[in-house]
Amino acid sequence: MIPTVRDIVSLPVVQAGEPEVLSAQQLDRPVRWVHVSDMPDLAGLLQGGELVLTTGAALRDAPRDYLRRMHRAGVVGVVVELGTRIESLPDSVGKMAQTLGLALVVLHRQTKFVEVTEAVHRLIVADQYEELEFAHRTHKTFTELSMKRPSMADIVRAAAEMIDESVVLEDLSRQVLAISPRNEPATTVLADWQQRSRAMTEPWVTTAVGPRAEEWGRLIVPHAPAAADKTKMVLERASQALALHRMAERGRTGLEHQAQSGLIDDILGGRIDDDREADARALALGLRAGGTYLPATIRVGAPPDRLDPVGTQRRNIRILDAVTHSVKAQGHSAICSIRRDGEIGLVLALNPRRGSSAEVTLSRLAEGWREAIARGGDADKVVIAVGAGAGAFADAVHGLREAAHVAEVAASMPDLTRPFVRASDVRLRGLITLLLDDPRVQMFAETELKSILIHDADQGTDDLAVLRGYLELAGNKSALAKRLHMSRPALYGRLASIERRLGVNLDDGESMTSLHVALLVLDAQRVAATQPPR
């Protein structure tokens, strides 16, 4: 930092002169330079902000005029060495300096002014060099960051790390898009955020984000920073990086969606582990406070052309927009994120109508989602899964894994009629889907059904369909004959043939269970083959 008058007086070379402060005015003002002179008028030589060292000749002859000229020249203080030209100063000089707002210090022992100027100038030059080095480091940091296609949160985090201050990015509606707290919890930073941001009565440092006349947000350090100039420099560079990021991401998704997705990723990635901070950030992004938060996953069938990444991304954004629009149109609030192709994860805060239960409200919302997604041209199968409710936002975010799993399983169920599904609706299919990649599960299904699969493929028969119907009806042969429009003797013959081919007794409970599980594994494998990769 640039040294102040107080810093200079504290230097060993000055302390050796036994300094006495006659006027404490301006002691904490930074000193731009040190000038040595006994001239009575330095107005034409100084630019303001200097500390003058003198032996006091001009001060002795006309102290009031001398101090007034120093004041007009912008000097912050005068250091007078006694014993060379003058032995003492009039008693009134200190009061004159105080009145004019000048620091005045006398040295009672002879001091080499050259040593003082060298010491002070080393501090000033070192500070200027440090400023240049910091500016270079700031430029390098944000330039390298921009090359890596960072998120808004990454840029805000880099700015906070450089200045060790809390940094907040908000949009023009005062919603917090990203925050990186330092030396204080996020809950403290975000307390009554929108009200405080609109009032702007606190000593915040702010920088607009976006081109002139097209600003879309502000970067804010929500208090008086320790190093104001460095803070302003970093915020300006971060603002430029955010503007570049916005240009690069334009057309992909909106700022609000990016911020919401970043919050969910931060919680799932363990970067936010404080429930209060998670709640505060979610509320700052528009989630309604209070009540129960519900994790939900909306899964839409695979796109017709998976090899078109641009088309796939646009489709994902179209689905996300449809979901968020339906949530807002029905008076609810949510934090949403694209989790993978065709899959939206969200934490929902319901606002039920008077007299409506949560189940009815969810059913109405689910139908609204399906209609909105269909209007966008995505008429594929839409599966909506809801996880267990939670009182804390972070807990609900972690529940998205369960909701995604339930949606994945439900997508394989051909006769899905419920508006939305829960874990209790998938049961054994859920376990099988979890274990589907296990080679032992695959081998089990293959071993159980291999002979009948080969026979159907070679002979063009449908024994597998007959077996499936038999197991679905829990071995009720009369009901199966009626379903297949087949006489009982003919059905008994088919079942006997299947028993011989499989080498099992179809009336045995364990055999029926094993074959049923094998069929579920086969169904799950076929569905998985049509799904987009994770």
Image: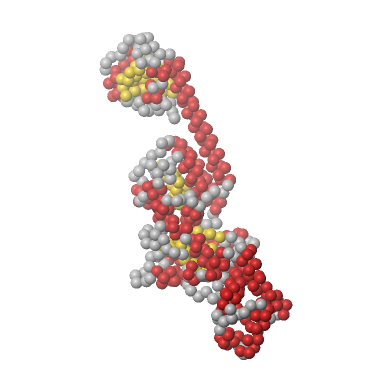
Q: Nearer the viewer, residue 189 or 127?
A: 189
Q: Could you say where residue 412 lies in the image, as x and y percent from the top left?
A: 57, 70
Q: Residue at x 43, y 21 (%)?
A: 34
Q: Nearer the viewer, residue 152 or 430?
A: 430
Residue 166 quadrant: top left
Let me know if residue 167 appears in the view.
Answer: yes
Residue 283 quadrant: bottom left
Q: Nearer the viewer, residue 475 or 178?
A: 475
Q: Residue at x 61, y 72 (%)?
A: 518
Q: Could you say where residue 270 lies in the image, as x and y percent from the top left?
A: 49, 51
Q: Is residue 426 above or below residue 391?
A: below
Q: Is residue 331 above or below residue 186?
A: below
Q: Quadrant of the N terminus?
A: top left
Residue 335 quadrant: bottom left
Q: Could you say where residue 269 lies in the image, as x and y percent from the top left?
A: 51, 52
Q: How is the image coloured?
A: secondary structure
Let me know if residue 35 appears in the view.
Answer: no
Q: Residue at x 54, y 42 (%)?
A: 142
Q: Is residue 249 above or below residue 90?
A: below
Count of marks overlaid on the render: 0
Q: Is residue 513 above or below residue 144?
A: below
In this rendering, would 523 be left or right of 261? right
Q: Quadrant of the C terminus?
A: bottom right
Q: Could you say where residue 390 lies in the image, as x and y percent from the top left?
A: 41, 61
Q: Nearer the viewer, residue 287 or 480?
A: 480
Q: Residue at x 56, y 60 (%)?
A: 340
